Amino acid sequence: MRNETGPLSPDPHQIRPRIDTRHNPHAPRHAAPASAPDAPGTAAGSRTLFTLRDILLWCVLPVLIVLGLRLFVFGLYVIPSGSMENTIMPGDRVITTHLSPRPIALRRGDIVVFKDPANWLANEGASHNSDRLIKRLIGLPGDTVECAGGGAPIVINGVPIDESAYLKPGVEPSRSAFSVTVPAGRLFVLGDNRANSADSRAHTNDGAQGLVPVDDVEGVAFVRYWPFNRMGWLSAHHDVFRDVPTRAPTG
């Protein structure tokens, strides 16, 4: 008798599940090869090394740049007295540029820091030990600076100037009368607080007529950095002197 049956059924023990990755998003399509740790000397491994070149580039070079700027470009000064009130106050700290008087020429109105030429600070009641002064430059070499006193304006080369933009409120341009012609290599300076400033007016009989040698100027102040609540730029007010003619020094 012939046994007629359909196709043979597969052995259930030999059935292997067939996973269709198209319908199973959790099945990995490709097996990623295991990554080995970066070996020393490889490009990736070398990124973690701090070489001598890196030390020079990121540590030594910035320090040298800062020191160079501090020595040759910028200066830091503490204001020793009240002679420049209210522009700058005693104890204020300012930054100056050493680029003046050379290579950048000085201008009338610049706030200059210079060596004390004849113990001027002794007459200003300085509250900070210093051998440097800070004043506003009024007369350049060749200028004739004069004042009739008693509230009259300062006159430079025959032109009266309006100093109300920087003089301390209530202070006269000069109570005393004077007339000085600035020779070559010298400067005429005044404080913004004329009532408490032993400046060029107070030293007209010191043998140099109270004039500051240009070579003693160490820089021009341009910003106050302390105290923080009054941090800001210091104005030279060059516009006050825009109508003053220039005269060549005679000696």
Image (cartoon, rainbow, N blue to C red):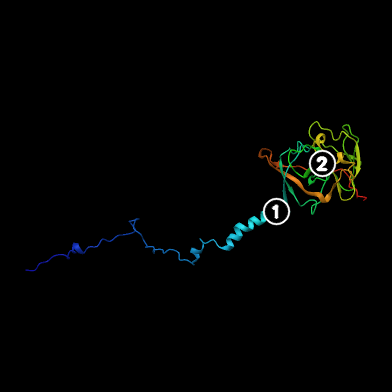
The secondary element bearing badge 1 is classed as helix
**Quarter containing the N terminus:** bottom left
**Can you give x and y, in whole percent of width and height, for residue 209 in the image?**
89, 43
Q: Earlier in the sequence, mark 2 or mark 1?
A: 1
Give neighbour class at mark 1: few <14, some 14-19, many 20+ (Cα, 10 Å).
some
**Can you give x and y, in whole percent of width and height, for residue 154 in the image?**
87, 38
Q: Nearer the viewer, mark 2 or mark 1?
A: 2
Residue at 69 percent of width and 55 percent of height: 68
Residue type at tag 2: Trp
- Which residue bears the numbered disc 2? 120
- Determine which quarter of the picture holds residue 137: top right
The secondary element bearing badge 2 is classed as helix
Residue type at tag 1: Leu
Residue nearer the viewer, 232 or 5: 232
- Which residue bears the numbered disc 1? 69
**Can you give x and y, in whole percent of width and height, for residue 139 in the image?**
86, 44
Give neighbour class at mark 2: few <14, some 14-19, many 20+ (Cα, 10 Å).
many
